[in-house]
Image (cartoon, rainbow, N blue to C red):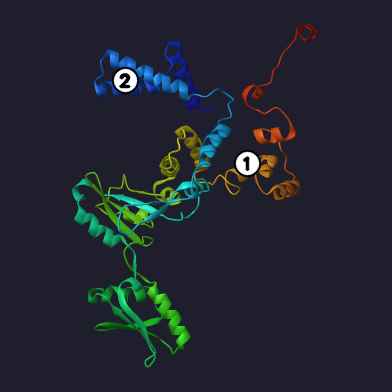
Amino acid sequence: MSEELQKELKQINRSMSNGSTLPQKIEEEIEEIGRQKKFNQKQKQRFIEEVQKFYLKSRFQPGETVGIIAAQSISEPATQMTMRTYHFAGSAGIRVTYGLPRLIEIFDAKREPETPVMTVYLNKSFNSRETARVMAEEIVEKSIEDVTRRVSINLNEGTIEIEPTDLKRVGTIIKAIKDEMKELNVKDKGKKISVSPKSEMEIKELQKIKEKLLKIHVSGMRGISNAVVRREGEEWIINTIGSNLEEVMQIKEVNEERTVTNNIHEVAQVLGIEAARNMVISEALKTLQEQGLDVNITHVMLVSDVMAMTGEIQSIGRYGVAGAQTSVLARAAFEETIKHLVRASIRNEVDNFEGIFENVMVGQVIPSGTGMFDLVAQFKEEESKQ
């Protein structure tokens, strides 16, 4: 047992011996809130009673199978979920995956969500419609295809001609092409940009180059394909299709403490594993609540803790938490039974029957509840013999 855990247990025991049902840390927080809210003695006592009620209700007995209860509590209401999408307000009609597909995305820790989105909040000093509109325009990714009127192949000269919609972007387009495709010659011809290979090419090869040119990134942030400005109370918020949290948070107008993305792996990369864990909790609860399903947050917190305990977000499935179990039979009972049993026999693996599933499979008492204890007794006859 760690020193920190021993210290915490001593504090709890000390609190219990003083006639309190709350740990010392919670009592200190109650005192702090009482001072902030300026509670009188009667209000403070009522507050303590309410906290005690919730604290006792949230505790679980030693040996309780909290994992199975959490799985049941989430999966039972999830069977009532529908396969549908949620629409943001706005003329762009941003469609975001919700319902069961989104819940599967979260717990499977999908690397890229089907519809990655960001909610960008602005700092108070920049909170205006005009600022939000200009910023939304600037962060949307634009390729050559988006900023040109026409891209054609000149068969006489063997070149590709690009006609920009705005002549102010000519320099930017030329620079983007030179950075991305150094093997091409690029010339500014007034209202057009001429792109030619350094050696003669057939029409098919020119066509391939043309397709590559159209996809070259010119401005905005990579990954953000659309943005919608909307008002929420007194705030102007930008909702985006696509996500690039790291770059967006570097903009001075953006409130980096509130800006979020639904891409959990991106949150882990930019803000760390704790932020990603919190994102799993908030996204799962939001998905359930959006369809009127009430699941206690403690069950979702337990699942998120298991997903994040290794320092990176793992899926619950065969390639994550379930597949990493030490028990051979527990892995085999989940999925790919033959593969796990054959691999375990080749590697000479041993199952110590320390979990619940493997003991149920062979008909033994499970190591939880009263089954997690062994009774050891020393009788008088044995004492006299010794």
Name, please, the residue furthest toward the bottom: 156
Q: Specify whether 278 is left or right of 326.
A: left
Res. 12 in view: yes
- SS under mark 1: loop
Closer to the camera in the image, 50 or 348: 50
Amino acid beneath label 2:
Glu
Vertical placement of 165 versus 333: above or below?
below
Amino acid beneath label 1:
Gln
Q: Considering the image in quadrants, where does the C terminus appear?
A: top right
Q: Specify whether 383 is left or right of 217.
A: right
Image coords of residue 97 (percent x, y) = 44, 52
Q: Considering the image in quadrants, where does the N terminus appear?
A: top right
Closer to the camera in the image, 174 or 10: 174
Q: Can you identify the residue that label 2 sits on?
A: 31
Image coords of residue 324 (percent x, y) = 61, 44
Vertical placement of 8 versus 270: above or below?
above
**Which mark identifies residue 45?**
none
Image quarter of residue 199: bottom left
Image coords of residue 64 (percent x, y) = 58, 26
Q: Specify whether 269 is left or right of 37.
A: right
Report the number of discs.
2
Image coords of residue 179 (percent x, y) = 36, 73
- At horizontal 76% and vertical 8% (from top left) the residue drawn is 383
Q: Can you identify the residue that label 1 sits on?
A: 325
Q: Specify whether 165 is left or right of 213.
A: left
Mark with earlier residue (1, 2)? 2
